[in-house]
Image (cartoon, helix red, strand yellow):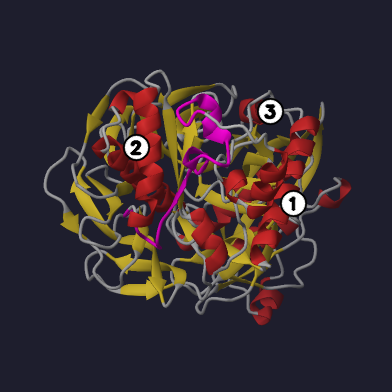
């Protein structure tokens, strides 16, 4: 059995940011996938003694992923005894998670989780987590990640974070929240717009574009220290930052030499090397996961379409051909597909292209989709859309089957970016 | 009347901005000057006409920049959807500014490009940059040196009209000329 300590330093780092009043994002599930794995998450023995239940967060995580069908009625089950396998099998569960939470003194708790295979009647995994009372949700996300990985065979994304911009009257706030929208913290507030947040590959920094100096300038913001520096501030406009997988360079769009063109700058703000040259617009660069290519939007062919260029420069290759407006390329973490926004009959919709076959699929039925962002395991896509004239965030599973909305009451939310897996 | 409605909206937006500026605990940052937009509205024109002194003005003086009788008070160039071509109807406006900049070589301008809300924010930022660049190029062809001009983009981020209608979007597809001291 492994003992896991939650990183206290990280929690303290976020605590340095001055919290302000803001509503928690809310999850609304509006669809369901086909072949979901039936799993029961029992209440853990002793968890009710703490104000907030861990297992309700675990269930919500697994449900939201679209990969599981939750089986109710398992009751309270401890990790210390075998669960009622026959009863669980009758209820239709293939697996069950049981557990316990006990206070170990000095404000610390130990939560144990044991995952059973209901069909084979054996133990799949046992874990123990040492945490404080303020780390209940974080512990629950770790448990959900473990269950996801054991049953699906790939990493979960429940312990990751998302960044996004909240606009209220005369105020723009760059916020960071857990992947389920809870625990939102402001990272930066400004009276001028903030757009295009992008996570560094190690999750420690956010690059973004701020208009506080009356023109767009690219900044890099260290999340733990809340310190920031200018990554690109040349004559004209500076925008669309995208991290190279090495975390040392950024692709940016500069207009310093005329037009909006692609450049590579060092993430510390030094040097700017031109990557491509066109007479039109080149923008929205994004590195492929292997760092080999940069996907971008260009109107060089007469309408905005998606192209790619080797990250070291060279010949460009056009990727999209259907329609007259295909923008915002986001190559998937496994490099096999690309999420982007396409315009059809005046509607802007999230689409997914298989890069090998060039087959495309519309993932949404909304009309004002923007800024798609893959979960680090590639299973879900977070994007901005509009409901009732208000900006909201939504997620959709990469197969298009499971959709949900995340919303902040009475605010306008936009520009989401899904952070990397915790290191 | 749509123009009256528009100006009323602008006035309330401006007063709201002033209230917010007064209430905000943010570090002081000058508010974006929506130059050209104010002076373009008929309400303002009427008021200025009745209150402005009757005496003549120097068309090449700095005061002329904000004098509604001067073509220099017109600061906005409007564009078609998904286009960054400067239409002929704005040529006389640009000629006036080019002449002023030639006569006042110490003055500089910031050209801010804007886009309507439809589509990708970053693509709109680039599109609005193209509009600002197109205005700069027009002035350059009229003899204005590069050293007196900077073209930047505000993308779709600073709309003067926030309704999702073509009338509103047309107001937002725009290049604005701001002079030294106005930005």
Question: Could you tell me which secondary element the residue under label 3 belongs to?
Answer: loop
Query: What segment is highlighted magenta in the picture?
Result: B58-85
Query: Which residue is the extreme one toward the left?
Result: A315
From the viewer's side, name the closer residue of A98 and A85: A98
From the viewer's side, name the closer residue of B67 and A133: B67
Q: Which residue is mark 3?
A: A17
Quadrant of the rendered structure where residue B27 is?
top right
Disc 1 versus disc 3: distance between alpha carbons? 25 Å
Residues at discs 1 and 3 both on one chain? yes
Residue found 66% across the figure and 71% down from its top: A85
Q: Which residue is mark 1?
A: A54
The nearer-to-camera label among 3 and 2 is 2
Q: Position of residue A73 (x, y in %)?
A: 77, 72
Disc 2 versus disc 1: distance between alpha carbons? 42 Å
Few, some or many C-alpha atoms within 10 Å of disc 1 (few <14, some 14-19, many ≥20)?
A: many
Magenta stretch: helix, strand or loop mostly: loop
């Amino acid at each position: 059995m492994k003992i896991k300590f939650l990183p206290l330093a990280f929690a303290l780092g976020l605590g340095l940011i001055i919290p302000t009043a803001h509503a928690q994002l809310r999850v609304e599930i509006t669809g369901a996938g086909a072949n979901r794995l039936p799993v029961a998450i029992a209440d853990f023995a002793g968890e009710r003694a703490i104000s907030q239940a861990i297992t309700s967060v675990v269930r919500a995580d697994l449900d939201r992923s679209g990969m599981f069908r939750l089986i109710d009625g398992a009751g309270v089950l401890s990790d210390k005894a075998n669960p009622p396998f026959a009863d669980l099998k009758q209820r239709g569960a293939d697996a069950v998670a049981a557990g316990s939470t006990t206070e170990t003194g000095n404000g610390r708790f130990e939560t144990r989780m044991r995952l059973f295979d209901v069909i084979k009647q054996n133990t799949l995994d046992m874990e123990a987590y040492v945490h404080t009372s303020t780390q209940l949700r974080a512990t629950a996300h770790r448990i959900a990640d473990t269950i996801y990985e054991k049953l699906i065979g790939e990493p979960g994304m429940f312990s990751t974070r998302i960044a996004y911009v909240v606009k209220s009257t005369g105020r723009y706030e760059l916020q960071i929240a857990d992947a389920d929208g809870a625990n939102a913290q402001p990272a930066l507030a400004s009276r001028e717009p903030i757009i295009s947040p992008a996570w560094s590959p190690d999750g420690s920094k956010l690059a973004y574009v701020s208009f506080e100096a009356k023109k767009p300038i690219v900044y890099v913001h260290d999340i733990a220290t809340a310190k920031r520096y200018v990554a690109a501030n040349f004559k004209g406009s500076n925008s669309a930052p995208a991290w190279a997988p090495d975390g040392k360079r950024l692709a940016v769009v500069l207009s310093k030499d005329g037009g909006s063109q692609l450049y590579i700058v060092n993430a510390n703000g030094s040097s700017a090397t031109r990557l491509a040259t066109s007479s039109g617009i080149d923008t929205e660069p994004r590195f492929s996961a292997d760092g080999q290519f940069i996907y971008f939007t260009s109107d060089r062919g007469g309408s905005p379409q998606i192209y790619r260029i080797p990250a070291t420069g060279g010949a460009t290759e056009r990727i999209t051909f259907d329609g007259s407006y295909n923008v915002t390329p986001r190559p998937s973490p496994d490099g096999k597909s690309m999420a982007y926004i396409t315009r059809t009959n005046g509607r802007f919709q999230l689409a997914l292209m298989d890069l090998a076959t060039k087959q495309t699929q519309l993932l949404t039925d909304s009309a004002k989709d923007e800024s798609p962002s893959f979960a680090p395991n590639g299973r879900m896509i977070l994007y901005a859309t509009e409901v009732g004239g208000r900006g909201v965030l939504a997620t959709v599973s990469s197969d298009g089957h499971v959709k949900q909305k995340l919303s902040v009451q009475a605010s306008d939310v936009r520009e989401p970016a899904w952070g990397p897996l915790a290191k | 009347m749509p123009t009256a409605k528009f100006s009323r909206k602008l006035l309330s937006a401006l007063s709201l901005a002033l209230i917010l500026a007064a209430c905000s605990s943010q570090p002081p940052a000058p508010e974006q000057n929506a130059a050209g937009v104010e002076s373009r509205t008929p309400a303002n024109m009427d008021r200025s006409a009745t209150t402005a002194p009757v005496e003549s003005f120097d068309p090449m003086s700095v005061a002329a920049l904000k004098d509604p009788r001067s073509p220099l008070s017109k600061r906005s160039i409007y564009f078609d959807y998904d286009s960054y071509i400067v239409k002929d109807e704005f040529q006389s406006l640009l000629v006036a500014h080019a002449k002023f900049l030639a006569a006042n070589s110490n003055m500089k301008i910031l050209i801010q490009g804007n886009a309507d809300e439809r589509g990708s924010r970053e693509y709109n930022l680039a599109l609005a940059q193209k509009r600002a660049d197109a205005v700069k190029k027009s002035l350059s062809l009229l003899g204005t040196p590069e050293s007196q001009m900077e073209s930047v983009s505000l993308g779709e981020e600073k709309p003067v009209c926030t309704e999702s209608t073509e009338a509103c979007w047309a107001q937002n597809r725009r290049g604005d000329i701001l002079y030294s001291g106005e930005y």
